[in-house]
Image (tube, rainbow, N blue to C red):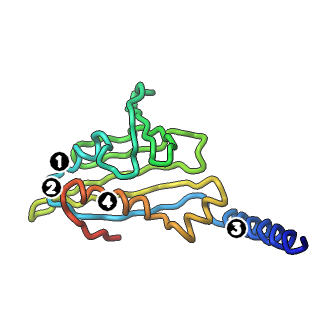
Amino acid sequence: MKWVLWIGAGLILLVGLVALIGAMLPSRHHATRKARYRVSPGVLYAVIAGPPEWRTGVKTFGLLPDQDGRKRWWEEDTHGQKITYELVEDQPPARIAVRIADRGLPFGGTWTFEITPIPAGGSDLRIHENGEIYNVIFRFLARFFFGYNASIEGYLRDLGVKFGESPAIEQ
């Protein structure tokens, strides 16, 4: 019976330590990655701005009424979590900025997509994430286990699959 108490105390101590370390980390972070595709900026822009059915993490999605003149939509991931997004900047075919519009999530922030034509043909895409992680446990896990770039890299790989390419992901 004593070993059950020791295990329980150890788990409580571990969670407390993770929370303490997470609380000491900054809630805001910036992450960026770049990849090159053999498609024009217009084609790349259209895929990014269009329906997300090509993304592996999106199970379903839907449009919402505009709010304050901003396009809004929701996406449901493969775990059943729905997130509402809003378009905050749109400069076809060069730049798009999207913000998480849900305030009740343990995270938030914006993704800015910068599309640049390359002289040999094709496009470079750089994604900037200015994120916030409010939950101290998630903050710890993101910093030490998942990495701040994991979502961006997955997105860039999914785009590569969409275009039949295997892009090199750069910093």
Amino acid type indicated by mark 2: Val
Residue designated by label 4: 156
Instruction: Measuring from the top left, give residue 67's x and y in whole percent.
Output: 45, 27
| 118 vs 54, nearest the viewer | 54
Mark carried by residue 22: none
- SS label for mark 2: loop
Residue designated by label 2: 39
Q: Is residue 2 left or right of residue 112?
A: right
Residue designated by label 1: 43
- SS label for mark 1: helix
Label 4 or label 1, whichever comes before in sequence order: 1
> Contact, CB < 8 Å: mark 3 with mark 1?
no
Instruction: Mark 3: give few (<14), some (14-19) or many (20+) Cα within 10 Å.
Output: some
> How far separated are the C-alphas under marks 2 and 4?
14 Å
Label 2 or label 4, whichever comes before in sequence order: 2
Instruction: Mark 1: give few (<14), some (14-19) or many (20+) Cα within 10 Å.
Output: some
Residue at 47% in and 38% down: 84
Residue at 31% in and 59% down: 156
> Contact, CB < 8 Å: mark 2 with mark 1?
yes
- SS label for mark 3: helix
- SS label for mark 4: helix
Residue at 27% in and 64% down: 35
Mark carried by residue 18: 3
Specify the quadrant of the image occupied by residue 121.
bottom left
Instruction: Measuring from the top left, give residue 170's x and y in whole percent.
Output: 31, 70
| 7 vs 157, nearest the viewer | 7
Label 3 or label 4, whichever comes before in sequence order: 3
> How far separated are the C-alphas under marks 3 and 4?
30 Å
> Contact, CB < 8 Å: mark 3 with mark 4?
no
